[in-house]
Image (cartoon, rainbow, N blue to C red):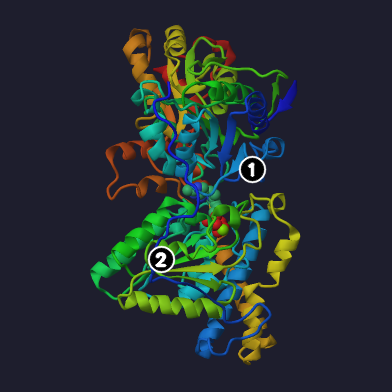
Amino acid sequence: MAQLTMVQALNLALAELMRDDPDVLVLGEDVGVDGGVFRVTDGLYQEFGDQRVIDTPLAEAAIVGAAIGLCVRGFRPVCEMQFDGFSFPAFHHIEGHVRRLRNRTRGRFTCPMVVRMPYGGGIRAIEHHSEAPEATYAHLAGLKVVIPSGPRNARALLRTAVLDPDPVIFFEPKASYRAFREEVPDDPETLPIGKGVVARAGRDATIISYGATLRAALEAAEELYDEYHIDAEVLDLLSVAPLDAELIHESVRKTGRVVVAHEAPRHCGVGAEIVARIVEESLLFLEAPVARVTGFDTIIPFFVNEKAYLPDAARIVRATVETLAF
Amino acid sequence: MRVWADPPQKKGNRVPRENIPLPCRVESLSVLSADGVLDKDLEPKLPEADLKRLYRTMLASRMLDQRCLMLQRQGRLGTYGPCRGQEATPLGVAYCLREEDWFVPTYRELPAYLWRGWPMEKHLYWWGGSELGSATPDGINDLPLCVPIGTQCQHAMGIAWGCKLRGDNTICACFVGDGGTSQGDFHEAMNFATVYHVPLVMVIQNNHWAISLPRHKQSASQTLAQKALAYGIDGIQVDGNDILAVIAATSEAVEKARTGGGPTVIEAITYRLMMHTTADDPKKYRTAEEVAEWEKRDPLPRFAGYLRQKGILDDDTEAAFKDEINAEIEHAVEIYENTQHDPFDMFRYMYAEMTPELQRQMAELKRHLETPLPAPSPREQAGDVV
Ligand SMILES: Cc1ncc(C[n+]2csc(CCOP(=O)(O)OP(=O)(O)O)c2C)c(N)n1
Ligand SMILES: [Mg+2]
């Protein structure tokens, strides 16, 4: 058992995977000698060498495009996009080929690659370094979109993602990279993709969240309990595609009150899909309208104003109290 | 299950072929060497007042850059990307432009911004996390800093194309890094630029590093300038730490662009003396010896030496410049630190007219920021919240 940050836990998962399978390759900008700008790949270059941990030229389209070819030749590339904002040159390949290869070749070729990227705000970063575009990817059928919330589940999910026979977009909440440590067991673990967890059990309301916002949700739940005597259940989705609808229905049917919280913009966000699912199958269990606490439908402001944009515990508390008061 | 035999293996000499004479060249240019030796034949004849102003701007950039690093360390600025050691190229290029020309930077061209009249506080705003830093001042034909590497090449090409279509005798200069030349955007922009024969000067600041990736791992080409050849234009390599060489090469490229001669690629050889940004630790990937070698080629003392030799600069002038610049920096820092930032601005510039939904969201944020949270419900009333 070791107390690890999310960065260390992800690093551990990559090292374990690379030791287990010589076909696992890591490629991206500054992932080798430098160990990645967030140090997620630190030490891998030294252990596995420059044929498996590859510092590529600066071209995201080429990184993912090449990874498709490497997949065809039987490798399992783990691509790093230095920040989510720079994944878009590769979007062309992700949309046009990564998600389609299995389907269009009727299973002859597949893309068991992982595209990792730090995402989200809250670290006072410069322009293009703070967006949360998970819905953009979740909208593309053929991709799985995973978002861990802490060191332990990050390590387990990355393992599952790399072992998965299909492409996985792996969003790493950079605000949680070093925010806290967690016990991580000695032996590798996996967590199923498409399954969420109850992060805090409760009976009065359901707060549904994921990624860095999960911490705000848990903080809000504590405050709701202490200050308002509201016992909120907090769900950590862990995957936004596929979505764990069962987990959502089960909780909603128990509490009848729902708040969805994510930092991505509201319009067509993951929250919209969650609400749609609830309306489709659990509508009659609701006792109040579902509230969404999200980023606004704007560009996330440069960092002096990012606090006003990002959902925090206070906004979640307010929404939950109002939902309960409905 | 093999259907075909392998094709016959090629043996012996290659078949004879003809050389295609290409009308392109890659040349290199240096005027004032690192140890201060001047090539008198190539020396651009610049008015004394211009030389003085150039030096003052180079010094101002150096001092503001230094100050930003300090502010960052004190937590008064965000992550900062210094440009120390690279001042000669953006400054020399900016000098060759007319005011009404267009300038499209990436993010290491501070001296060019200063030359073109951006107030210093703009630089502080940008790295200090405020959009005020990317709001180009009225009357200045520059795009703001560009972070998604390489994308600006396309915009600059489009602007240059617009210059041609408008027929207003303006041109566009664009900056990209050595790393940026690996992006498709750079190549696509060069292709369009030559197909449409637009008045573009594409300057590659080859500072030898793209974060941790050294130039030789970025591209297997011997020079970056030669990438121009593929698109049918000339590429030139200049000593980017030699402002006279930069000016000599750029003024020709600008003239060529303005007179309908089409685009040029200039590869400026320079060096990033500092970290990539303050979030970076260059000790992980490069040696102090390498940096020390490049310290010797620092463009600032080199330019100063030249000016002193010409009798244009002396200790008194230098000291006076420093005093003035320090006062300017102080003034800018004061403006920067006393600016109130309105969070509701995030809604105001999304569309020409704010959508009803954005108005609703703005009101929602206003209500949240201005209304205290509902009063806590005491424990005694447990279960009685609704
Ligand atoms: C499309 C894109 N990918 C990745 C990044 C992250 N990044 C910022 S600067 C940089 C290196 C740029 O190197 P170069 O073009 O040589 O410019 P320099 O920083 O040396 O001036 C990288 C990879 C980015 N900003 N944009
Ligand atoms: Mg560079």
Residue under label 2, please give it: B19
The amino acid marked with disc number 2 is Asn
Q: Nearer the viewer, residue A213 or A220?
A: A213
Asked if B369 appears above or below A18 in the picture, the reply is below
**Ligand 2: which quarter?**
bottom right
Camera-nearest residue between B165 and B336: B165
User: Residue A279 at what x, y percent from top left?
Assistant: 33, 15
Residue at 36 percent across and 72 percent down: it is B101
On-image quarter of the N terminus of chain A: top right
Residue B62 picture quarter: bottom right
Q: Quadrant of residue A264?
A: top left
Pointer 1 residue Cβ closer than 8 Å to ligand 1: no
Q: Which of these two is toward me, B162 or B316?
A: B162
Which element is circle 1 on? loop
- Per the image, the residue denoted by label 1 is A32
**Alpha carbons under labels 2 and 1: distance apart:** 41 Å
What secondary structure is found at the residue carrying circle 2?
loop
Q: Chain of mark 2?
A: B
Q: Position of residue B358 (x, y in %)?
A: 33, 39
| Residue B346 visible to an observer of this rendering | yes
Coordinates of residue B174 in the picture (x, y in percent): 43, 65
Chain to which the residue tagged by mark 1 belongs: A
| Residue nearest the observer in this picture, B313 or B224 | B224
Q: Residue furthest front?
A: B12
Q: Is residue B86 left or right of residue B114?
A: right
Q: Amino acid at mark 1?
A: Gly
* Residue A220 visible somewhere in the drawing: no
